[in-house]
Image: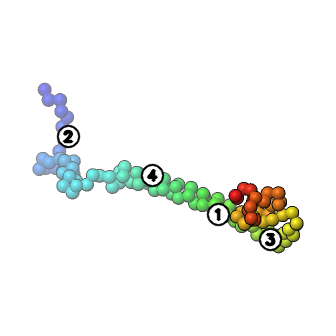
Amino acid sequence: MDDTIREPLDRKDGNDSDSEDLSGRAGRGDNGDEDGSGGVKLDALEAEELETVETTESATMLVDETTEIREIRRSEMNLDIEAELMRGDEFVCRSCFLRLKKVQLAADALCRDCV
């Protein structure tokens, strides 16, 4: 006894329409991803890329805001303040340019740290 199920033929010539469609696709070399899972994968990739771009833009905005805050703070600084005059017991180191007490003088206009 034969257990296979046979479908009725659609055409008079005895060919099944489903078998004809499959042979036509095989001849073109298509894999059938045009409307199927390939489109879904592409949408997922585009969504992931968009999310990455948005994350990058938000990180860039934080950096820009930080830069703006720094610029505002720098502009608020007043550089018109004059330094105090040097006293008789102070010198300026030739190497590090710090104003120090003469007690820290080690060599000719050099502090102990720079010698």
Q: Tell which circle, 1 or 3, labels the residue nearer the N-terminal end.
A: 1
Q: Quadrant of the image for the N terminus?
A: top left
Q: Tell which circle, 3 or 4, labels the residue nearer the N-terminal end.
A: 4
Q: Image quarter for residue 67?
A: bottom right
Rounded to the nearest angstrom, the CA distance separating label 2 from label 1 is 69 Å
Is disc 2 surrounded by few (<14), some (14 to 19) or many (20+) residues within 10 Å? few
Rounded to the nearest angstrom, the CA distance separating label 2 from label 4 is 39 Å
Judge depth for marks 3 and 4 and give the one in front.
3
Judge depth for marks 2 and 1 and give the one in front.
1
Label 2 is placed on what type of residue? Answer: Glu
Task: Look at 38% across and 54% down and name the residue there.
Answer: 39
Judged left or right of residue 58, residue 23 is: left
Q: Which mark is residue 7?
A: 2
- Specify the farthest residue to the left: 13
Colour mapping used in the image? rainbow
Q: Quadrant of the image for the C terminus?
A: bottom right
Rounded to the nearest angstrom, the CA distance separating label 1 from label 3 is 25 Å
Judge depth for marks 1 and 3 and give the one in front.
3
Who is closer to the viewer here, 83 or 47? 83
Judge depth for marks 1 and 4 and give the one in front.
1
Q: Which mark is residue 79?
A: 3
